[in-house]
Image (spheres, rainbow, N blue to C red):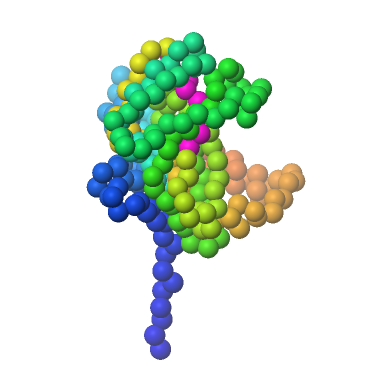
Amino acid sequence: MSFFRKPAPTIQFLCEPKDEGVIAPPVPAKAYLPDWFRKLPAVDDTKLSQTDTGLTVKRCMPFLDAMTTGWIIPLAATVRMEIKEGGAVMEAGWDFDRTMISNHGMHQVKGNPWGNRPPRKFHNYWTITTPPGWSCLFINPMNRPNGIFEIISGIVDTDTYRSPVHFPFFATGPDGLHVIEKGSPIVQVIPFRRDAAEIPAEIRAETKTEADIRIKVLRLTQAATGWYRTKARAKR
């Protein structure tokens, strides 16, 4: 008897043949860890004391997992963005033969929390496809604020929408000229199964057994032994 393993779900990033090798390609999110994070020690010896372990966020697996989950779509070409009047006015230019940034109407987001900054849109030249039943969450790269723009989150059913998804954003940087280099991380893409996002919820008070488990996990976590990283997370 022969057994066949079901192939793992695959996300595809497809570009037009003329763009291959020209525009920056998507990469795993773990390949875009910022320099400050790479340079940060796991333990700051200068902070060690009886009340402080000296551990830094580099040992925080929830923080790291958020940064390394999914894929990063980088900017296809270098963009020059001049922000004026607190983001109410923004002019952009680029050395590329197609549109990199376009504008949305302010009426589309009237009353939004970003104030009088009108929405803009980064143009993306990668078509993203996922298996049936899978969608993609598009968000600002997690734990990577760039101080210039903020992507507006969205979900697209990439199993049926077989065309490039563009990325709305607000210019949040200070007034002045900002250069965003080709290859800079623009969007984090997290594929997920839609049925997994629709599981029913159970909302109630915990049982005695559940409380004991919660207290045990809290104690192990506070002991700074790396329990979550080496035990809980390793069981995934």
Identity of the residue drawn at 49% across and 10% down: 85
Is 79 part of what is drawn in magenta?
Answer: no
Predominant secondary structure, magenta span: strand
- Can I make out residue 85 in this image? yes
- Seen as rendered, the residue at the extreme right is 204
Give the quarter of the image for residue 56.
top left
How many numbered discs sit on the rendered protein? 0
What percent of the width, then of the height, locates residue 83? 43, 16
Is residue 186 shown left or right of residue 114?
Answer: left
Q: Is residue 199 above or below residue 166?
A: below
What percent of the width, then of the height, locates residue 60? 42, 35
Give the quarter of the image for residue 17.
bottom left
- Seen as rendered, the residue at the extreme left is 21
What percent of the width, then of the height, locates residue 114? 57, 21
- Can I make out residue 52 in this image? no
Q: Is residue 233 above or below residue 222?
A: below
Give the quarter of the image for residue 34.
top left
Identity of the residue drawn at 38% across and 12% down: 176
**Viewer-side residue, 53 vs 202:** 202
**Viewer-side residue, 41 vs 105:** 105
- Seen as rendered, the residue at the extreme front is 97
**Viewer-side residue, 5 vs 81:** 81
Identity of the residue drawn at 45% across and 25% down: 149
Identity of the residue drawn at 43% across and 52% down: 128
Range drawn in magenta: 167-174
**Viewer-side residue, 232 vs 104:** 104
Q: Quadrant of the N terminus?
A: bottom left
What percent of the width, then of the height, locates residue 137? 52, 45
